[in-house]
Image: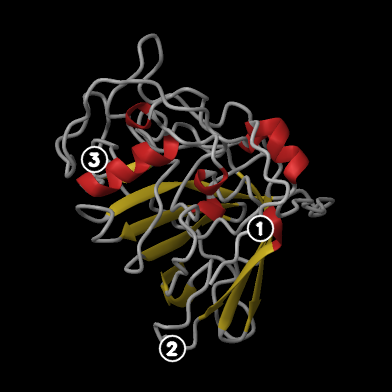
Amino acid sequence: MLAMSAIGSAQDAPAAPPGGRGGAPTAGYPPYARPTTTFVPPKTPDGQPDISGLYLAIPLPRGIETPLVPLANRSPNRANSEFSFSINERPKLPEGAIARPVGVDPPDGKIPLTPEALARRKEIIANQEKIEYLDGRVLCLSTGVPRSTIPAPVVGYQIFQKPGAVVIFYEQNHLYRTIPTDGRAPLDPNIRKAMGVSRGHWEGNVLVVEVTNFTNNLGNNWVIGAISATPGVPAESLTTGHGIPHSDQYKVTERYTPIDASTIHYEAKLEDPKVFTQPWTIAYYAFARAPKDYVPVEYACFEGNDKNLLLMTNTDISGIRVNVP
């Protein structure tokens, strides 16, 4: 929880460029290309590529995004995973994976926020001392997709497969998803969940998942966010993805690519016409197979833990209870 503490109040910063800022790559960013592999995973009894097992998160090589206004004396693409670690060796990364942020499209690494979404983000980051603006992860709420796949300290995953479905268990906050791969129809759009509703299919050995029907009743269910952001950094200078809630039109398309017997590459395209001026894509090596003696740990996070929140944010929520419709 301490590693995911809330962000401090924002400082004044130069005016940000207008929304819709996807464009030419920032100097030094090589173009992104999906990794290719000749690896052929074994098959499950029903013929699915077998990617089941225990995995550990691979620390991000760089930040989530390129900031609009880089801070003086700070790298514009500083990694936000300095405090994450893994007992696995990081797999060899393709050219450009170290140089560029996790956001690969638009190629400049900047999140293509609408002017309204950028204004909302600035409001959220400037009010982190108020409970209603806090990061949902700090409040022990579900992180949603793709944020549940962004590495955090000591976080693992377990993938189960059964006929017609892939199930992912997240060590973080005991989250889980059932991903049907049997071609069933989507759920009624009025049925909404914090982790969304997933529908998957296999393209060769790649698991492709479309996620829709996200609940929209909590403004702190942000689409992304890596660990924690440095207190006092204004919204225009963040590299972490914090402070971006989605709308009721949010949709994510994921790609899980087994690179070898021990590594899965992850890609996610985020679409939300009320938040982004164009689709936005992240990509990185996400899962490394865990050692044989690895055991998922108890993730002890308590909603409404007022003492921890008071220590982290100096915000007293004792006596405050919010009724969520």
Judging by the rendered image, the residue that carries numbered circle 2 is: 183
Type of amino acid under label 1: Arg
- Element assignment for label 2: loop
- Element assignment for label 1: loop
Would you say residue 270 is visible in this rendering? Answer: yes
How far apart are the two marked residues, 2 and 3, measured between alpha carbons? 33 Å
Front-lying residue, 155 or 201: 155
Please name the residue shown 64% across and 84% down the image. Answer: 45
Type of amino acid under label 3: Pro
Q: Is residue 180 left or right of residue 21?
A: right
Quarter-wise, where is residue 148 in the image? bottom right
For residue 107, the mark is 3
Front-lying residue, 181 or 234: 234
Residue at the limit of the structure toward the bottom, as seen here: 184
Please name the residue shown 62% across and 35% down the image. Answer: 5
Residue 61 against residue 36 in the figure, above or below: above
Q: Residues within 10 Å of mark 3 (few under 14, many from 20)?
A: many
Quarter-wise, where is residue 206 in the image? bottom left
Q: Is residue 55 left or right of residue 37?
A: right
Type of amino acid under label 2: Gly
For residue 321, the mark is 1
Residue 1 against residue 221 in the figure, above or below: above
In x, y percent, where is residue 311? 72, 31
Tell which tag, 2 or 1, sits nearer the viewer.
Answer: 1
Quarter-wise, where is residue 187 in the image? bottom left
